[in-house]
Structure formats: structure tokens, C-alpha cells
Image (cartoon, helix red, strand yellow):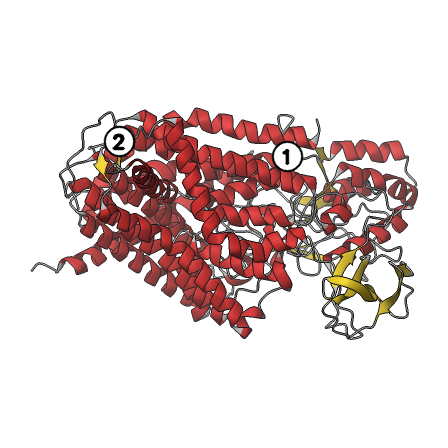
């Protein structure tokens, strides 16, 4: 009996798919898994006193249960993976470059910080922890985004009618008292502002802030195992002090756990935070 | 060395190595497409599937074979996802819900790899490797097969025969994709990528907290995800995950794998049509657009324009330390210039113009160099349009590679070109007009619009990357984006095969003094011009509402 051609084609399709599933879906991954067991290709977890404490490739938080930085440890980057460095919910923040206006609310569920405010507050916190200037462009001195909502008589043009510092909740004092002759008010929480032009104010912070970029931004994976060499350097003094170590000894360890660029140009140098902290604990 | 110098050398080294690979890789592809001998394994496979490898197919049968294969793939993958909870290695995850299963099955069958789920909280190992990763191979092979059929249409004359889809499919899997994937996967394993069947190992961290170190057959899936320009990550954060892409140099290899097949296909094309110069011309057009795009994206993100990047001092939000801003931008350009959609950094946190460029790359139709197969067939369709436009200018019947471009050919080419813009723009409009769909946006205003526009652009062009702020795992988006992916894949394939059939039937036109020399810089320039103008006219209004408005405000 001859099958109609359209059935024949679907049968051929089904058979191809099954054959391919066996070869490409089972044999291939199993082969790679077997090869991965060979000595030299296997990657073991890091251990302390014989107990696994993590992977050199997966970052960790070095904070106490309240989320406060433990000063004897080098700190990792901010993380958007779950509550931080959760491999079961990897994520970036996905917030955009002009995400600059907070939702202020007395209700914690509704309130949300803009990316700009997150950057500003992290910078302030890191600055305090390390004893350096935490100021950044477009940030207020109290660590939120310096953004004014400017209302004009004719929408985008005309006389200014009202100016609100959008990220500073009353009764905070606005970071500038007046804008082009109009008094600046703090924002009222739970108020839906609309019709304004969001105007970020640069301020006089240095172009190159003391707190490095990676210390104030979340990574792509939320599991970034590394920090920049600059951020590691910034933390040396504190860690050495807390541990009663010589800063030179700490710097030497940083050098040991820094990966440079392959061939001199591939990748960016970074310091593996878990490996470094583990080495400090064992030093 | 400064990060800028390193970033430039990074791009230069990729260009140099790809240029060196162009001839050997392209020649290998040529032999795969035209060889007459079958290996013993292949003959065994043909016997099992009941196909006569010597039987050639006319375009209608070739197209129906593609459609039958796509339908079966879709059904089986859907069933696989729906039944996950009852299978081995499910890691305790339940069956995937119907709408998400539909979306995911379409997504992997169409080489899109849009992911409305996150791997670590939805899928078990068996579905990942025996369901999704298999489609990573097969959907890439289908794209290449369709492309080869089109090239045969140009190369052959007075015939109905375009080759045998099943033979093309099997050969591409066994002789191209699998060998390279094996080597790449072992390299990734050596670098530290995960390749095991662990269901996660809970450890106590240095500070006494708990963390689960994830596991799974990730490296094997990574390799084909990139080589096949698929892009579906094993975990939610895709190629940013340290167990997927552990080092700066694996990042380089990932970009190389993305570009390898799309870049070397023009060589195989040139050899099949009997003129290597034709291959170089297509490569030159692809290369011009690609290098311009990579340079602009590096510049946009490197300059860190915009409020948050200025406050930070660099566009580091959503990038990994080991890749840095510039080398992440190069990955971002490569993944959107092809139909890959893997990401090693998050496009929604790029500078406004940088994010806009990734979208523009996809809107170009992913032809520079484009996805595996789909890039070259897309570019050849544009070449047909270009000779048509050139023919109109000088009042001659247009011809390309010795084939007349008549009304039938132009109809197929135009239909091809109209499909994706129609899907993108209508889809975005419907989403913006639907209140429930608007609620999925993470941001408001122009960035929120960009999220939606990006989603439909990515789905309709079978890219699969995301402005991931959008909560796309909803009934509306799973269904709508699924439809866009399906139509955005299969309609162009049918038009391409129709074009191939009508070209193959023609008798060749002898070259005359008036023939447009389609291997000269003039033609390359026109080709690039047509790509840019067609795109600019179609998408500029939508782009103006999204990234351009955001970048200028």
C-alpha cells in the first residue's frame, strides 16, 4: 500500500526528529558530560576546612542577615538576582539609562527606586563604608537622584509655574532651593505627578567619582564573581584594618586573585571576590 | 592597555580570524551542499527515515517537507513541555502551562529562542537537552537548507529540482553543526562552564548563608545555541551566566561561533554559482553594515551618554566585570546582527542610542551577516530587489547571476520583505492599544514603548533577545509573540523557496555589455543603500517614538 505523499512526509519528519533526538539530544550531551569528567577539565567547588563554600564562578554576598556589609570582607557588586546572588533567580535590573524618577510612597509595596537613585544611594553607602567621597553627578547629597520636575505654562515651553524635587519626599529639604527663580518643593509621597519635564541636575560632583562604576551598578547575571581592580583597591584599607593585617599583604592577595586580559586584550581585569575572601580567612 | 584599545583589538581580532576562516569554512560548506557521497551513518539514517537520498525535490515538495518537519517539531516539543512533570530529570518542575509551552515550542522551532520563562525555575534537564537543544540544531539546519535551495535556484537552470530537504538537513547536522559543537562545548567545559546532571548543590556560604550552585548540561547547549544562531540560554541570564560564559576569552569564542556560519556561507554561495567574486560582493555588503554597527554600538555605550551612565561614569549597569562595557557591546551587536538573541549584557540598560542600535540591527532583517542560512537568503532577496531598482533606473530588464528578475520573482521578493515589518508594526500597535498588554511594561513612556517594540521586532525577526523589562510571560504576549515568530519564520521560507523554484526553471541569460556587474563595489554600495533605505522608511517612525525620543529628551 502506498501512503499519500503528505502523510509520507510527516512520517519522514517524525522519524528524522526521533533519530536526531537520540543523536543530538542524548548522545551529544552525554559525550560532552563524559569528556568533562576527564582530569584537567573538571572544576571543583571551593572548600574551607574540607567543606564546600561556593564556586569561584558564582559570586556571593558578604553581608550580615540585615544586608549590612561585613567589614572584614571584600564586598561584591550589587546584584539583581533574587535577594542578591541567588542562582535560582538570575537576573539583571533591566532598568534603562533614563530611569530617573522614583515612585515615592509610604507603602513599601508601591514605593520603588529609580535606577538613578539606586546608583546614588549605593555610592553614598560605599563612600561612607570606605571613608571616601560618595558623591556622583546627578545625585543629591542625601543619596537620591537629583531630578527636578518642572512645570511650564504651555507644557514644554513658557513660564515656569512649579518645580518639585521628584525623588526627595517631604519633609526633606530639596537639594536646590530654587530653579530659575522658582522655589523648589519636595515631593509629596503617593502623589501622581504628571505633565512635568523631568530635568536631572548635574551638580558639582567630579566626573570621575571616588567610588568605581561597578560598585554602584548591578551586573548582568546577578552572579558576577568579580569586582574591578579599582573597587578592590578601594576596599583594601578597610579590610586590612578590620583584620589587623598589613595593607601590602592584602594587596598581594588581590594580585593573586586578579584575572588579567587574555592575550593582553580579551576581557577586562577582575578580582574574584570569593576566592580573595577565602584566602583572607585562611591567611 | 586601556579598555578602549582592548575593545578595538577585540573587534579587529574577530574580523581577522573570521576573514581567515572564510575560505576553509565556506569551502567545507560547499562540499557539504554539493557532495554526492553519503557516509555510512547517513545512509543508515536515510534507511531508517525511509527517504531516497538521490531523489530531488521541486520547490513545492521541498517547501512541504520543511513545513511538515516544522509542524512535527512544534507538536513534539509542545508535548514534551506539557508532559515535563512526568519525565526524568524534571528537577521537580511541573508541566509547563499551555500558553508558555506554545510560545516556547514555536520559539525554538523557528530558531528564535525568545524565552518567556527563566530556565532555572521552569525547565528540567531532559527537556532542555533532548527538546530545546535538539531544535537548536534542527532549526539552524532548516535555515541553512532553505538557503542552499535558493542558491541552487540561482545556480541551476531549466530544472524543477532544488535538492532533497532531508539530505540537506541530515548533512548539515552531521557534517557541520555537530562536529563544531562538540569542539566548542569541550572548550567551554574546560573554561568552567557547567556540564553535569546535578539538580543543584546547596552549600553554606563563607558568611553562613545558603546558596544553591546550579548544574545541568549547559556547555553542550551553549555551543549549539551560538553556532546555530539560536540564542536560548540554559539559564535566565543567558550568556551572562558565569557557568555559561565563564571568562573574557569564552566571550570571544561565543561571538566567533555566532558569526562563523553566517559569514562563511557567502563563500559557499559564490562557489555554487561559479563565481567567488559574487560571494565576496555579498560578504562585503554584510561586512560594511556589520562593522559600522559594531563601531556605533561600541561608541554609544563607550561614551556613556545619558543620565544614569553619566552618573555612574560608564554604562556598566547590566554588564559583567569580566567582559567590560565594550566587549559586551560587541556581543550585543553580533547577537542582533545575526538572528541569535543570546545576550551577555542587558540591552535595556544600554545607553539609549546603544539600545536603539540593537533594535535597528534586527530591523535590518538580520542579513548582515544574519542567522544561519536566513541571513544569506535574506541578503539574496535584497540583492534581487537591488538589481530590480537598478534595472528601473536604466530601463533594462533586471537580471542577477544570469537569471531574469521578472514579475514572479519580484512578487516573491516583495512579499518576503513586507512580512516582518507588517508583523512588527501591527503587533506593536495591537499591544499598545490593549490595556492589559500595556501593563506588562516595566518602564513608562518611550522606554516602555521600546520594550514592546523590541519584543515584536525580536519575535518577528526570529532573534529572541529582549529588552527584558517587559513581563512577557502573559497570555497575550505568549500568544501574540508566538504567532509573530511562526509567521515571521515560515512565510519568508515559503517565499524564498518559491523564488528559488522560479529561478531554477529559467534558462540562463548570457552576460552582455549592459549587464549590471553584481560583483563590483558599485553594486555593493547599492545593496547597502537599499538595505538602509528600506529599513529607514519602514521603521523610522516607530524608532522615533522609542529610543530616539528617549535619547534626545
Nearer to me, B190 or A52: B190
Q: Which mark is residue B469?
A: none
| Side of B178 where A3 appears, left or right | left
Q: Which mark is residue B272?
A: 2
- Same subunit, labels 1 and 2: the answer reads no
Q: Can see residue B464?
A: no
Q: Chain of mark 1?
A: A
Name, please, the residue furthest toward the left: A1
Cα separation between marks 1 and 2: 39 Å
In this rendering, the count of numbered labels is: 2
For the point 25% across and 42% down, the residue is: B149
For the point 56% across and 44% down, the residue is: B332
x, y (%) of residue B6? 65, 29
Nearer to me, B307 or B407: B407
Q: Secondary structure at mark 2?
A: helix
Quadrant into which the N terminus of chain B falls: top right
Quadrant of residue A31 within the rendered picture: top left
x, y (%) of residue B358? 54, 47
x, y (%) of residue A51? 70, 49
Q: Chain of mark 2?
A: B
x, y (%) of residue B101? 43, 65
Q: Which residue is mark 1?
A: A267
Quadrant of residue B516 within the rendered picture: top left
Amino acid at each position: 500500500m502506498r501512503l499519500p505523499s503528505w502523510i509520507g512526509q510527516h512520517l519522514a519528519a517524525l522519524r528524522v526528529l526521533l533519530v536526531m533526538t537520540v543523536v543530538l539530544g542524548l548522545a551529544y550531551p552525554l559525550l560532552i558530560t563524559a569528556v568533562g569528567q576527564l582530569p584537567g577539565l573538571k572544576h571543583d567547588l571551593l572548600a574551607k576546612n574540607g567543606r564546600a563554600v561556593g564556586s569561584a564562578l558564582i559570586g556571593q554576598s558578604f553581608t550580615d542577615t540585615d544586608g549590612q556589609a561585613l567589614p572584614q570582607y571584600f564586598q561584591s557588586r550589587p546584584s539583581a538576582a533574587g535577594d542578591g546572588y541567588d542562582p535560582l533567580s538570575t537576573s539583571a535590573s533591566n532598568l534603562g539609562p533614563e530611569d530617573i524618577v522614583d515612585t515615592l510612597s509610604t507603602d513599601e509595596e508601591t514605593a520603588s527606586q529609580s535606577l538613578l537613585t539606586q546608583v546614588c544611594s549605593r555610592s553614598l553607602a560605599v563612600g561612607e563604608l570606605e571613608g571616601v567621597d560618595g558623591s556622583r553627578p546627578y545625585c543629591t547629597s542625601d543619596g537620591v537622584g537629583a531630578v527636578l520636575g518642572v512645570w511650564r505654562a504651555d507644557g514644554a515651553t513658557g513660564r515656569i509655574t512649579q518645580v518639585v524635587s521628584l525623588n526627595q519626599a517631604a519633609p526633606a529639604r530639596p537639594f536646590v532651593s530654587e530653579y530659575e527663580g522658582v522655589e523648589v518643593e519636595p515631593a509629596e509621597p503617593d502623589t501622581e505627578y504628571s505633565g512635568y519635564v523631568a530635568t536631572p541636575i548635574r551638580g558639582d560632583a567630579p566626573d570621575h567619582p571616588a567610588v568605581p562604576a561597578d560598585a554602584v551598578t548591578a551586573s548582568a547575571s546577578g552572579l558576577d564573581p568579580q569586582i574591578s581592580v579599582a573597587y578592590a583597591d578601594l576596599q583594601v584599607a578597610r579590610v586590612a584594618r578590620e583584620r589587623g593585617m598589613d595593607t601590602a599583604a592584602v594587596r598581594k592577595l588581590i594580585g593573586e586573585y586578579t584575572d588579567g586580559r587574555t592575550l593582553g586584550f580579551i576581557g577586562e581585569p577582575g578580582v574574584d571576590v570569593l576566592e580573595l575572601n577565602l584566602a583572607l580567612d585562611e591567611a | 592597555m586601556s579598555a578602549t584599545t582592548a575593545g578595538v583589538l577585540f573587534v579587529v581580532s574577530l574580523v581577522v580570524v573570521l576573514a581567515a576562516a572564510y575560505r576553509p569554512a565556506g569551502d567545507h560548506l560547499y562540499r557539504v551542499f554539493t557532495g554526492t557521497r553519503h557516509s555510512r551513518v547517513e545512509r543508515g539514517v536515510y534507511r531508517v527515515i525511509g527517504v531516497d537520498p538521490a531523489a530531488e525535490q521541486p520547490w513545492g515538495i521541498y517547501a512541504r517537507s520543511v513545513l511538515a518537519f516544522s509542524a512535527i517539531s512544534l507538536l513534539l516539543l509542545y508535548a514534551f513541555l506539557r508532559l515535563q512533570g512526568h519525565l526524568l530529570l524534571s528537577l521537580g518542575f511541573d508541566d509547563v502551562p499551555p500558553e508558555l509551552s506554545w510560545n516556547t515550542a514555536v520559539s525554538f522551532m523557528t530558531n528564535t529562542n525568545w524565552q518567556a520563562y527563566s530556565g532555572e525555575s521552569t525547565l528540567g534537564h531532559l527537556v532542555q537537552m533532548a527538546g530545546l537543544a535538539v531544535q537548536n540544531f534542527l532549526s539552524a539546519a532548516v535555515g541553512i537548507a532553505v538557503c542552499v535551495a535558493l542558491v541552487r535556484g540561482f545556480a541551476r537552470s531549466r530544472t524543477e529540482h532544488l535538492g532533497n530537504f532531508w539530505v540537506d538537513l541530515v548533512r548539515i547536522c552531521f557534517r557541520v553543526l555537530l562536529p563544531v559543537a562538540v569542539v566548542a562545548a569541550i572548550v567551554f567545559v574546560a573554561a568552567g562552564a557547567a556540564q553535569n546532571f546535578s539538580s543543584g548543590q546547596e552549600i553554606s556560604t563563607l558568611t553562613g548563608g545558603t546558596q544553591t550552585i546550579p548544574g545541568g548540561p549547559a556547555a553542550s547547549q551553549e555551543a549549539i545555541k551560538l553556532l546555530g544562531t539560536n540564542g536560548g540560554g540554559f539559564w535566565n541570564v543567558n550568556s551572562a551566566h558565569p557557568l555559561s560564559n565563564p571568562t573574557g576569552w569564552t566571550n570571544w569564542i561565543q561571538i566567533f561561533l555566532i558569526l562563523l556560519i553566517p559569514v562563511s556561507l557567502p563563500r559557499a554561495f559564490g562557489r555554487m554559482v561559479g563565481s567567488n567574486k559574487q560571494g565576496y560582493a555579498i560578504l562585503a555588503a554584510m561586512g560594511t553594515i556589520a562593522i559600522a554597527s559594531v563601531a556605533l554600538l561600541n561608541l554609544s555605550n563607550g561614551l556613556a551618554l545619558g543620565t544614569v551612565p553619566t552618573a555612574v561614569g560608564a554604562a556598566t549597569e547590566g554588564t559583567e566585570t569580566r567582559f567590560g562595557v565594550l566587549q559586551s557591546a560587541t556581543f550585543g551587536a553580533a547577537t542582533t546582527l545575526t538572528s541569535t538573541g543570546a545576550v551577555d549584557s542587558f540591552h535595556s540598560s544600554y545607553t539609549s542610542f546603544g539600545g536603539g542600535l540593537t533594535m535597528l540591527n534586527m530591523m535590518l532583517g538580520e542579513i548582515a551577516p544574519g542567522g544561519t542560512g536566513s541571513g544569506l537568503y535574506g541578503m539574496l532577496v535584497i540583492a534581487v530587489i537591488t538589481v530590480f531598482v537598478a534595472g528601473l533606473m536604466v530601463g533594462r530588464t533586471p537580471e542577477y547571476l544570469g537569471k531574469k528578475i521578472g514579475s514572479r520573482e519580484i512578487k516573491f521578493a516583495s512579499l518576503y520583505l513586507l512580512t516582518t515589518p507588517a508583523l512588527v508594526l501591527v503587533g506593536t500597535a495591537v499591544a499598545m492599544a490593549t490595556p492589559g498588554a500595556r501593563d506588562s511594561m516595566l518602564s513608562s513612556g518611550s522606554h516602555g514603548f521600546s520594550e514592546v517594540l523590541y519584543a515584536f521586532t525580536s519575535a518577528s525577526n526570529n532573534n529572541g533577545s529582549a529588552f527584558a523589562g517587559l513581563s512577557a510571560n502573559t497570555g497575550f504576549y505568549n500568544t501574540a509573540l508566538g504567532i509573530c515568530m511562526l509567521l515571521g519564520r515560515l512565510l519568508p521560507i515559503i517565499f524564498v523557496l518559491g523564488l528559488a523554484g522560479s529561478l531554477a526553471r529559467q534558462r540562463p541569460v548570457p552576460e552582455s555589455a549592459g549587464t549590471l556587474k553584481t560583483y563590483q563595489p558599485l553594486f555593493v554600495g547599492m545593496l547597502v543603500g537599499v538595505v538602509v533605505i528600506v529599513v529607514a522608511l519602514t521603521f523610522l517612525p516607530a524608532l522615533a517614538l522609542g529610543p530616539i525620543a528617549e535619547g534626545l529628551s
